[in-house]
Image (spheres, rainbow, N blue to C red):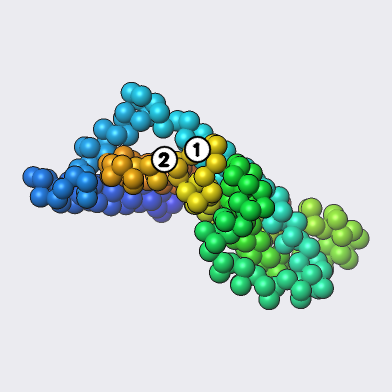
């Protein structure tokens, strides 16, 4: 009953908040008290969404480009971050050499790296994918290192006493135990990859135009309703990625909780 009530609360509470925000938006813009170019009504934004997604369907090519950049960068960042975390965890030399720089590298704003990537790789999708990968890399790396460093040492010692080799311990014990932390980093990192794609499109330009380029065009045209519609699409993409990783994370947590009970039986 408690778990069922909690699941209902996680659905109803955001829905109620969303309705309240929408109602406040509607009341604020009702009667034309605020010019449309400053804050359009919810109906105007809904019309832009309908036209861009259904009637003219001109949003979809931009969505496809942004998604390709974000997912490509997220995958690249993940494939580099997790082995790097394992190296830092396993090697005292790597740990001592890299950890002092992690805080400083996270403080570098992504928009400052975009011009450098333009110089290095040009106005191409590759630069935007690399920018997304950089933004994804550090949250996954830091969270994974924390997960590995907080493993149960008694479990690791028992596995070592049983004769398990270094690779076997890593694959069968260390990675599964650290996976909740790794997935937490993936959850935050994949969301940031959307931000990286948009920043890259707005700063780096290029032939392939995504939602970031479309946002810039709406600012120049002073089409605020369409601008808000694009922002909502970006928020939906980021929320979807966040939710998908959260589902995997939750299922893995449930699996690790129920598995010991099965073993005792």
Q: Position of residue 62 (x, y in %)?
A: 47, 35
- Kindly give the residue lying farthest to the left in the view shown: 31
Q: Position of residue 192 (x, y in %)?
A: 52, 54
Q: Name the foreground residue: 40 vs 247.
A: 40
Q: Name the side, left or right, on which 203 lies relative to 133.
A: left
Give the SS element for disc 1: loop
Mark 1 touching mark 2, by CB under 8 A? yes
- Counting every numbered tag in the picture gives 2
> What residue would you read off at disc 2?
214
> What residue would you read off at disc 1?
209
Give the SS element for disc 2: helix
Q: Quadrant of residue 81?
A: bottom right
**Residue 225 makes an appearance in the image:** yes
**Residue located at (55% from left, 41% from top):** 206
Q: Earlier in the sequence, mark 1 or mark 2?
A: 1
**Residue located at (48% from left, 30% from top):** 61
Q: Name the foreground residue: 262 vs 195.
A: 195
| Marks 1/2: CA–CA distance | 7 Å
**Residue located at (21% from left, 37% from top):** 43
Q: Name the side, left or right, on which 13 lies relative to 171.
A: left
Q: Name the foreground residue: 158 vs 49.
A: 49
Q: Quadrant of residue 141?
A: bottom right
**Circle 2 Cα neighbour tier, 10 Å, few/some/many (<14 / 14–19 / ≥20):** some
Q: Which mark is residue 260?
A: none
**Circle 1 Cα neighbour tier, 10 Å, few/some/many (<14 / 14–19 / ≥20):** some
**Residue located at (79% from left, 53% from top):** 171
């Amino acid at each position: 009953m408690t778990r069922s009530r909690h699941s209902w609360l996680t659905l109803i509470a955001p829905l109620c908040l969303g309705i309240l925000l929408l109602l406040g938006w509607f009341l604020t813009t009702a009667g034309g008290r605020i010019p449309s170019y400053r804050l359009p009504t919810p109906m105007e934004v809904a019309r832009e969404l309908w036209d861009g997604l259904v009637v003219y369907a001109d949003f979809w090519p931009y969505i496809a480009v942004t998604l390709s950049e974000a997912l490509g960068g997220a995958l690249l960042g993940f494939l580099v971050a997790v082995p790097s975390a394992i190296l830092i965890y396993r090697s005292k030399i790597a740990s001592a050499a890299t950890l002092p720089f992690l805080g400083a590298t996270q403080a570098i704003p992504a928009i400052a790296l975009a011009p450098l990537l333009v110089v290095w790789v040009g106005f191409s999708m590759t630069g935007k994918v690399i920018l997304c990968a950089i933004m994804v890399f550090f949250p996954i790396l830091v969270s994974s290192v924390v997960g590995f460093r907080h493993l149960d040492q008694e479990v690791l010692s028992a596995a070592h006493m049983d004769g398990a080799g270094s690779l076997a311990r890593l694959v069968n014990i260390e990675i599964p135990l650290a996976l909740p932390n790794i997935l937490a980093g993936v959850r935050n990192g994949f969301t940031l990859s959307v931000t990286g794609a948009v920043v890259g499109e707005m700063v780096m330009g290029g032939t392939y135009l995504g939602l970031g380029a479309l946002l810039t065009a709406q600012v120049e045209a002073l089409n605020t309703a369409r601008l808000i519609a694009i922002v909502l699409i970006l928020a939906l993409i980021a929320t979807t990625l966040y939710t998908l990783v959260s589902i995997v994370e939750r299922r893995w947590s449930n699996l690790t909780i129920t598995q010991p009970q099965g073993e005792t039986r």
